[in-house]
Image (tube, helix red, strand yellow):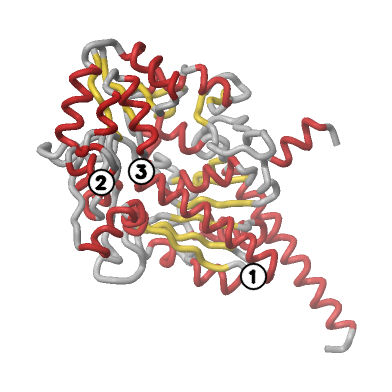
């Protein structure tokens, strides 16, 4: 095996694992996208008439796909299956039983069960299968059957209560953090179940929900509530725990400064020309700086607004104070650091540039050779494979009957 092939194999540890995705939108597709990037073969089952809803989202389109669909479904195969059609449904069922290692689904509560494709039904036939349910609120409790979407969960789990400026209206985090976070938990759960299957030979059910993911992102805030009864509030770009640790206005923009301990604060004070700040009783410790944040921020910003971002970045970098300018997406993906890490990947056909998996294995990032699939491009192969398995099963059954007859049974 060549060194290049060996590196590629190392970066695709799930090669040979077969996954079926039943669902759409963001959470489950992002989870199965992670599995695909790790080397699994993912078959995305879509509605014949329109496919995944995200195909039609957004006015930003490329090669007939929405940008959202392209980002979440690159590298997958697509089969258009009408689950209301018993023959098509049976073909999918047989395909899962005969060939599939993992099912990931986020259809409405009760839908997969009504089609005989739920976890309990499939695991009873194939105990080694790993079945991952992605739901809104989980399968227990008063809200178990209620639908949910990312902004609803950002609201309900407290994320919006700590996002934005103190006196601003509610603001959602600017990315689908709950949906994509749930997809991550889905992938982590599947990886754990695959490892457990190696040990025991059995698969099992994995459950993830948007609600639990949202609460999970509130871990730090909840610890303050459980510990001292404190309810976190919106603090803009700052935090409730460290100061100075936020964005400061400069002459031509904003610079985020993170002086997270006394040593860094002393360096910051010197770089801003006010070494005496670190000896000021109000700012001697982080606890004191937090109590006097308003005064501290006013003094810092009175200095930073006198010069451009580049000047303050240079000064802070020279003394080792962590800082970063606020970039838009164009600036972030075209930055030399993004290029150096190789996280921006172009598909082999040259049609799509996409952000790759934020992981490397022995210095190699999992490849992303294929773009998003055309709706139903794998449908014929799915049905042909299922038909072949059905014919093979029929031949085996006939052969067994003949053997039994010869044996006088």
Q: Nearer the viewer, mark 1 or mark 2?
A: 2
Considering only vertical position in the picture, is 286 above or below 227? above
Place residue 328 in its image quadrant: top left
Q: Which residue is mark 3?
A: 177
Query: Could you tell whether 365 is left or right of 9 in the image?
Result: left
Q: CA distance from mark 3 to mark 1?
A: 32 Å
Q: Are marks 1 and 2 in contact (CB under 8 Å)?
A: no
- Residue at the spot 50% in from the left edge and 27% down from the top edge: 354
Exactly how many numbered labels are in the figure? Answer: 3
How many other residues sit within 10 Å of disc 1, few (<14), some (14-19) or many (≥20)?
Answer: some
- Residue at the spot 82% in from the left edge and 71% down from the top edge: 399
Query: Could you tell whether 368 is left or right of 67 in the image?
Result: right
Give whichever of discs 1 and 2 has the lower sequence position.
Answer: 1
Q: Nearer the viewer, mark 3 or mark 1?
A: 3
Q: Which residue is mark 1?
A: 202
| Figure quadrant of the C terminus | bottom right
| Figure quadrant of the N terminus | top right
Judge by depth and name the residue closer to the eye, 336 or 305. 305
Residue found at the far bottom of this picture: 409
Give whichever of discs 3 and 1 has the lower sequence position.
Answer: 3
Judge by depth and name the residue closer to the eye, 107 or 276. 276
Q: Which residue is mark 2?
A: 287
Q: Nearer the viewer, mark 2 or mark 3?
A: 2
């Amino acid at each position: 095996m060549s060194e290049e092939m060996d590196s590629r194999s190392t970066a695709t540890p799930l090669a040979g694992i077969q996954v079926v995705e039943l669902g759409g939108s963001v959470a489950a597709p992002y989870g199965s996208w992670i599995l695909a990037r790790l080397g699994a073969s993912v078959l995305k089952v879509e509605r014949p008439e329109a496919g995944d809803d995200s195909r039609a989202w957004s006015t930003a389109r490329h090669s007939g796909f929405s940008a959202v669909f392209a980002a979440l479904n690159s590298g997958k195969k697509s089969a258009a299956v009408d689950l209301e059609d018993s023959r098509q449904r049976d073909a999918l069922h047989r395909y899962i039983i005969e060939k599939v290692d993992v099912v990931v689904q986020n259809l409405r509560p009760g839908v997969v069960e009504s089609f005989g494709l739920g976890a309990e039904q499939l695991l009873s036939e194939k105990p080694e299968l790993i079945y991952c349910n992605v739901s809104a609120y989980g399968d227990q409790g008063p809200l178990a059957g209620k639908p949910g979407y990312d902004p609803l969960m950002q609201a309900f789990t407290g994320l919006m209560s700590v996002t934005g400026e103190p006196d601003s209206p509610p603001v959602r985090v600017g990315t689908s953090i709950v949906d994509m976070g749930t997809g991550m938990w889905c992938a982590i759960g599947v990886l754990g179940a695959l490892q457990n299957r190696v040990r025991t030979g059995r698969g099992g059910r994995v459950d993830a929900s948007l609600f639990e993911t949202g609460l999970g992102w509130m871990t730090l805030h909840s610890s303050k509530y459980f510990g001292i009864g404190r309810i976190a509030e919106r603090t803009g770009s700052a935090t409730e725990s460290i100061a100075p640790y936020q964005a400061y206005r400069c002459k031509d923009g904003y610079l985020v400064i993170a002086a997270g301990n006394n040593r860094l604060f002393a360096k910051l004070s010197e770089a801003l020309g006010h070494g005496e700040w670190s000896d000021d009783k109000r700012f001697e410790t982080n606890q004191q700086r937090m109590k006097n944040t308003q005064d501290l921020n006013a003094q810092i910003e009175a200095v930073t607004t006198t010069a451009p971002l580049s000047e303050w970045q240079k000064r802070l970098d020279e003394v080792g104070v962590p800082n970063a300018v606020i970039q838009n997406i164009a600036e972030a993906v075209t930055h030399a650091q993004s290029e150096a890490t190789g996280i921006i990947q172009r598909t082999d056909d040259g049609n799509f540039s996409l952000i790759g998996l934020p992981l490397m294995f022995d210095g190699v990032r999992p490849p992303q050779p294929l773009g998003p699939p055309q709706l139903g491009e794998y449908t014929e192969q799915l049905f042909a494979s299922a038909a072949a398995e059905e014919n093979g099963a029929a031949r085996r059954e006939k052969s067994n009957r003949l053997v039994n007859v010869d044996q006088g049974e």
